Amino acid sequence: MTTEIATLGGGCFWCLEAAFVQLAGVESVVSGYAGGGMPNPDYRSVCGGDTDHAEVVEVRFNPEVIDYGSLLKAFFAIHDPTTPNRQGNDVGSQYRSVIFTHDEQQEKVARELIAELAAAKIWPAPIVTAVSPAPTFWPAEDYHQNYYANNPQQGYCQAVVAPKAAKLRKVFAGRLKTGFQ
């Protein structure tokens, strides 16, 4: 089996992880940090704005089950790609919309999809999602991994994470793993 990697940032990594883990073909989702200059960043430094890292997820997927373009369509379905450095009440450059590509084909697919979505005028404002080569990925602290699954009753999870996971289930109903349908 071939496994590929997608590295995506679109707000809080808890939201992205809870959504992507539901998709058939997704082998694993790891919350972490990418795009800044500080080696081995930690949550406090990233949230403090001291590192220029974004909260991201590293998605390992089987392209024979779900292709990269479909992952990106899910990404755009669950976050607002028109708000720079913000997703809802989460504000700061760590919450920016970004696609870190792992090869030229991923870059091509990302740029073509953004152009297609922009032409369709799905959102009332321009798409600000950055596309750039994947830098070093730093896994977040253990307590951030599987956060929603481990803390479904937590207030932020109820108010923010759960609706995004539910939206993905609705939009991608035919692409879900067994148990998420």
Image (spheres, rainbow, N blue to C red):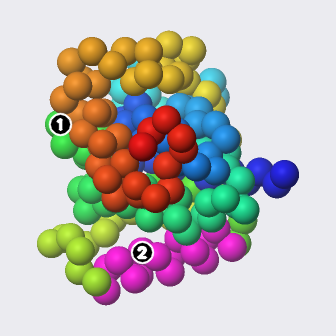
Measuring 23% from the left and 80% from the top, which residue is drawn there? 121
The correct choice, above or below, for 91 with respect to 152 in the image is below
Rounded to the nearest angstrom, the CA distance separating label 1 from label 2 is 24 Å
User: At which x and y percent is residue 49?
Assistant: 37, 31
Q: Is residue 125 visible?
A: yes
Residue reaching furthest right?
A: 1
User: At which x and y percent is residue 56?
Assistant: 50, 40
- Mark 2 = which residue? 114
- Mark 1 = which residue? 89
Measuring 23% from the left and 25% from the top, which residue is drawn there? 158
Boundaries of the magenta span: 105-119
- Kind of element beneath mark 1: loop
Residue 12 is covered by the magenta coloring: no
Q: Is residue 10 left or right of residue 179?
A: left
For the residue marked with disc 1, what is the amino acid? Answer: Asn
- Kind of element beneath mark 2: helix
For the residue marked with disc 2, what is the amino acid? Answer: Ile
Q: Is residue 180 left or right of residue 58?
A: left
Disc on the earlier residue, 1 or 2:
1
